[in-house]
Amino acid sequence: MSVAFRRESDEEHLEPKFELPIPLGPNLVTARGLTLLEAKVAELEAALPAITEEAERKKHLRELRYWRTRLATAELTEARAGGVVGFGSRVELLLNDKPRVIELVGHDEADPVAGKLAFTAPLARAMMGAEAGDLLDFGGKEGAIEVVASTTI
């Protein structure tokens, strides 16, 4: 029989499953971020014995590998002192004359809706090294950011 008429398995047409992407650069974490990483790994490890379906187990193990890697590479980083904006800072600012409070944290702790930005986010990068009273350019606008205060988390 010709190879053209051979039945191919359904497995040949499935999308490949890649590992979850790890953000580039250092894995800086706050003390809270490290606690969250440890809790996530413990939660996933505790749930593993109860998963019996193979596909679900593979998905769970993939996620567990991601979080174990993030925990293993975590670098606990202290916040900058002296009112200088940096990793681990809580910043009060005016962004286009609208008051905001944001915290600069690691990738896994970031939650923009809750005001927690990853230290690599454009807004966070624009404020690094600034102090209270500084006017900073952002988004192509001069003086778009005014730093009101910076404290450690």
Image (cartoon, rainbow, N blue to C red):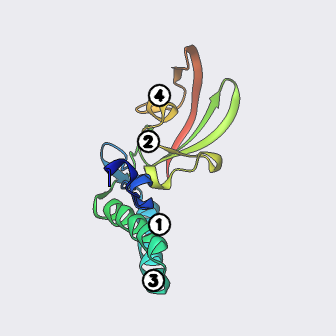
The residue under the point 37% across, 53% down is: 18
Mark 3 or mark 4, which has the lower sequence index?
3
Q: Secondary structure at mark 2?
A: loop
147 left or right, relative to 19: right
Instruction: Say which residue label 4 marks.
Output: 126
64 left or right, relative to 114: left
Q: Are marks 4 and 1 in contact (CB under 8 Å)?
A: no
Q: Secondary structure at mark 4?
A: helix
Q: Where is residue 61 shown, x and y percent of the image? A: 39, 70
Looking at the picture, tell me which residue is in the foreground, 152 or 18. Answer: 18
Instruction: Say which residue label 1 marks.
Output: 36
Circle nearer the viewer, 2 or 3:
3
Residue neighbourhood size for the residue with mark 1, other residues' Cα within 10 Å, grouped as few (<14), some (14–19), many (≥20):
some
Q: Are marks 3 and 4 in contact (CB under 8 Å)?
A: no
Mark 1 or mark 3, which has the lower sequence index?
1
Cα separation, mark 3 vs mark 4, equals 40 Å
Q: Residue furthest right?
A: 98
Circle nearer the viewer, 4 or 1:
1
Cα separation, mark 1 vs mark 3, equals 15 Å
Residue neighbourhood size for the residue with mark 2, other residues' Cα within 10 Å, grouped as few (<14), some (14–19), many (≥20):
many
Mark 4 or mark 1, which has the lower sequence index?
1
Q: Where is residue 102 shown, x and y percent of the image? A: 58, 43
Q: Amino acid at mark 3?
A: Ala
Mark 2 or mark 3, which has the lower sequence index?
3
71 left or right, relative to 33: left
